[in-house]
Amino acid sequence: MITLASCLLWVVGLAVSSCGSVPRTEIGSLHCQYAFKDGSFIGLFSFALGELPAPPGDPAQVDLVYYFDADDCSRGALFASDDEPGSIVPVGVRPRSDLAELKRPTDGAETLAAISPVTNDEEGLAFWIRTRDRGYVLVRLTAVEEASYSDLQSGRTPILKFEWLVPAG
């Protein structure tokens, strides 16, 4: 039996699902598993394609870089596609429920070239990352397998787990 209440619920559900104003949350992971000739290790990620091999077939596809070396990145670093200030806009440690309410960065926002070191303290950290197409994606780290450069040299593969918002529409 169809009631007025069930009809109203169906109409409201249809209106909410078709309005397209709510961003979708995607989940990803990034393994730092590729050794470079200089002794560093790298992992690459594309928001469109997922994890990428190193070197990537097309460097323009890379959005996130997870990197370790024997020097200043010995405990890991997370970079945008270009390793320069303005690429990462930190938001701070935030619960998932806050993500949809955060606004895109504006001119003059505090920026970073990288998040380093990448430790368990960064779990829950949210940040805007500038993509290759010069747009921004909101990312939140959900799990960090803390590691050191010597761990990678011993064969360990650290993994970052994260979620990001896909704009509605």
Image (cartoon, grey):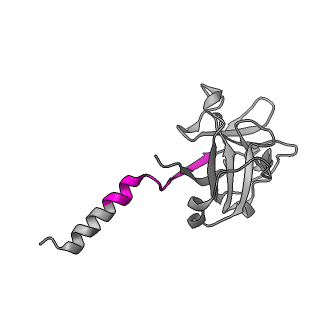
Q: Relative to 113, does residue 36 appear above or below in the rendering?
A: above
Dividing the picture into quadrants, the one containing residue 162 is bottom right
Q: What residue do we see at 60% from left, 33% from top? A: 53
Viewer-closest of 139 and 105: 105
Task: Tell me the residue at 64%/51% (across/down).
Answer: 159
In percent of width and height, residue 24 lies at 48, 53
Q: Residue furthest left?
A: 1
State the residue at coordinates (75%, 54%). Answer: 118
Q: Position of residue 119 (x, y in %)?
A: 75, 58
Q: Is residue 165 magenta?
A: no
Q: Is residue 10 or residue 122 the one in the foreground? A: 10
Q: Where does the N terminus fall, quadrant-wise?
A: bottom left
Left or right of 119? Residue 166 is: left
Give the image location of residue 138, x and y in percent: 62, 51
The image shows residue 132, relative to residue 115, as above or below, that is: above
Between 8 and 59, the one lying in front of the other is 8
User: Is 11 on the left-hand or right-hand side of 62?
Assistant: left
* x and y, in percent, of residue 42 in the image: 71, 39
**Extreme-top residue of the structure:** 57
Q: Which residues are magenta?
A: 14-30
Q: How many marks?
A: 0
Q: Quadrant of residue 37?
A: top right
Q: Is 19 in the magenta?
A: yes
- In the figure, residue 95 lies in which quadrant? bottom right
- Left or right of 168? Residue 38 is right
